[in-house]
Image (cartoon, helix red, strand yellow):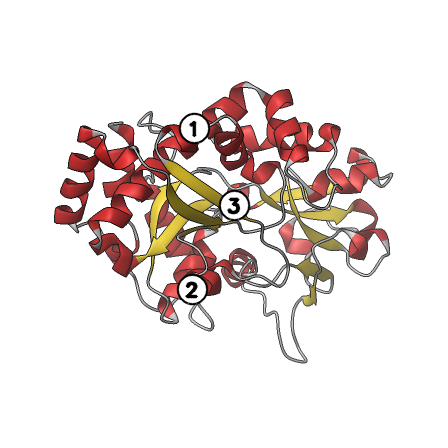
Amino acid sequence: MKNSLAAFAVSAALIGTGGAAQSQDEFTLQLKWLTQAQFAGYFVAQEKGFYEDVGLDVTIRPGGPDIAPPQVLAAGGADVMVDWMPSALAARERGVPLVNVAQVFDRSGMMLTCDKDSGITSPEDFPGHTLGVWFAGNEYPFLSWMDKLGYSTSGPDADVTVLRQGFNVDPLLQGQADCISTMIYNEYWQLIDAGMTEDELITFFYEDQGVATLEDGLYVLEENLEDPEFVDKLSRFIAASMKGWQYAIDNVEESAQIVVDNDPSGAATLEVQARQLENIATLITDPTGKGLGYLDPEAYRRTVDVLMTGESDPVITEDPGEAAWTHGPWEAAMEM
């Protein structure tokens, strides 16, 4: 979706005059998961008035285990969503025309974390073991990795046993799995907090296995990019959000407290959210030097290649090409 130039031109014109930013336009963001520092930049932008400064009244909707952001977006429940690219591209192939408009995380924080007592020291040791895997769209990088290794994951003669892991670390703590899915900013530290030591664990970063795919990015429906008014609001949203993310990275303690204050469950703690945000900052590095939120076309291509790997069961079967991303709204945002 690299084009839609007319829409972007109108958007830039509106932003340039400042006219569209005088009123408070409603805009809704659907998060991928529950309120936590993974989304700190958006809560900071809201709390510090960055959205208000660009004329937006933003509603942030938390996600959860029973919420699929692509479905929410398709049903009109949000204007923009946070999702991982594997999930978004899989949904696009199934008929939900999602387009990436900004890529916040440029590195993957996903790991497979194993108990050393299982005897696993390398991926070559996975066969014969039980591996905990998140589903609901999070399984795609894992399946691509197993396919690359040549390991079957289903059927009576499967090389590895896949445990559909809940969004917790119980399977490893309770001995139900030898390895589980973790994020460097979240579940890995839950294991540490539960009493395990780093010496008792061995981790395999997807980045190091050549199967890393892009994670938290911003996505909208393709049809909305033909609407100049929507693109104008989207560009303002991206500008304020990236300002929020930069502030969060530069002010970890304050930003973590903002996350805690916005957690409706009351379960978030400052210590945990600050630690999470410190680790998240390592995934937002702006490697191209173009600015936060810039989608590197080469990183996009690597993600597509990983997802199309595997003759038996690739995650996506058709290359979406440039139709699945655009720099237009991001570029307009950077001009603000």
Regarding mark 2 in the picture, which secondary structure is present there?
Answer: helix
Regarding mark 1 in the picture, which secondary structure is present there?
Answer: helix
Q: Who's the residue at 17% across and 48% down the image?
A: 7
Residue type for callout 1: Phe
- Categorize mark 3 by other alpha carbons within 10 Å: few (<14), some (14-19), many (20+): some
For marks 1 and 2, the one nearer the N-term is: 1
Residue found at the very far front of the displayed protein: 23
- Categorize mark 1 by other alpha carbons within 10 Å: few (<14), some (14-19), many (20+): many
Specify the label residue 90 is tagged with: 2
Residue type for callout 3: Ile
- Categorize mark 2 by other alpha carbons within 10 Å: few (<14), some (14-19), many (20+): many
Left or right of residue 264: residue 280: left
Q: Who's the residue at 78% across and 42% down the image?
A: 191
Left or right of residue 280: residue 129: right
Q: Which quadrant does the N terminus fall into?
A: bottom left
For marks 2 and 3, the one nearer the N-term is: 3
Left or right of residue 213: residue 156: right
Q: CA distance from mark 3 to mark 1?
A: 14 Å
Residue found at the very far top of the displayed protein: 250
Q: CA distance from mark 2 to mark 3?
A: 24 Å
Image quarter for residue 274? top right
Label 3 belongs to which residue?
A: 60
- Nearest-to-viewer mark from 1 and 2: 1
Can residue 326 be seen here? The reply is: no
Label 1 belongs to which residue?
A: 50
Q: Which quadrant does the C terminus fall into?
A: top left
